[in-house]
Amino acid sequence: MFQYAAAQGGNGIVGIIVPFVIMFAVFYFLLIRPQQKKQKNRNSMLRELKKGDKIVTIGGLHGTIVELTNDIVVIRVNDVTKMTFDRSAISHSVASSATE
């Protein structure tokens, strides 16, 4: 009788742990891993920006990069207007043009 109860108790622990392992695997492959990949691509895009690239900010402002530092980007919106943004405020690069 005790052997039967001990065998069931061991099976109960495995029965509890296995669903958590499966849930973690599902969360990792469906949520965590794609987010890490997206963040890696974004960081790569931000590192590769150069003067003359046409970009769009997170707020939707379109412009051309005039100056770059490690943290700050100055973009030209039109012939007269230049605006300063954090590099992290850039959403994506639209196209590259020749360096001025």
Image (cartoon, rainbow, N blue to C red):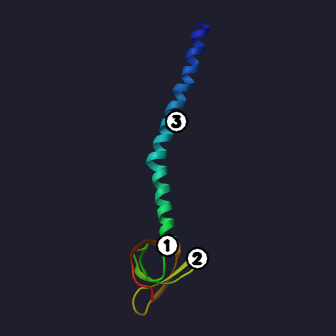
Instruction: Check disc 3 and report its element: helix, strand or loop.
Output: helix
- CB within 8 Å, label 1 to label 3: no
Which amino acid type is shown beneath numbered disc 2?
A: Asn
Which mark is first along the chain, 3 or 1?
Answer: 3
Does residue 43 appear left or right of residue 64 in this picture?
right
Does residue 5 appear left or right of residue 94 in this picture?
right
Which amino acid type is shown beneath numbered disc 3?
A: Val
Whether 41 is drawn above or below 75: the answer is above
The residues bearing labels 2 and 3 have C-alpha atoms spaced at a distance of: 41 Å
Quadrant for residue 76, please give it. bottom left
Instruction: Check disc 1 and report its element: helix, strand or loop.
Output: loop
Q: Which residue is mark 2?
A: 70
The quadrant of the rendering that contains the N terminus is top right
Question: How far from the left and from the top, in percent, is residue 69?
Answer: 57, 80
Which amino acid type is shown beneath numbered disc 1?
A: Glu
Instruction: Check disc 2 and report its element: helix, strand or loop.
Output: loop
Which of these two is toward me, 93 or 57? 93
Q: Which residue is mark 1?
A: 48
Whether 5 is drawn above or below 73: the answer is above
Which mark is first along the chain, 3 or 2?
Answer: 3
Q: Residues within 10 Å of mark 3 (few under 14, many from 20)?
A: few
Q: Which residue is mark 3?
A: 21
Q: Which circle marks residue 77 in the picture?
A: none
| Residue at x 39%, y 89% (from the top left corner) | 78
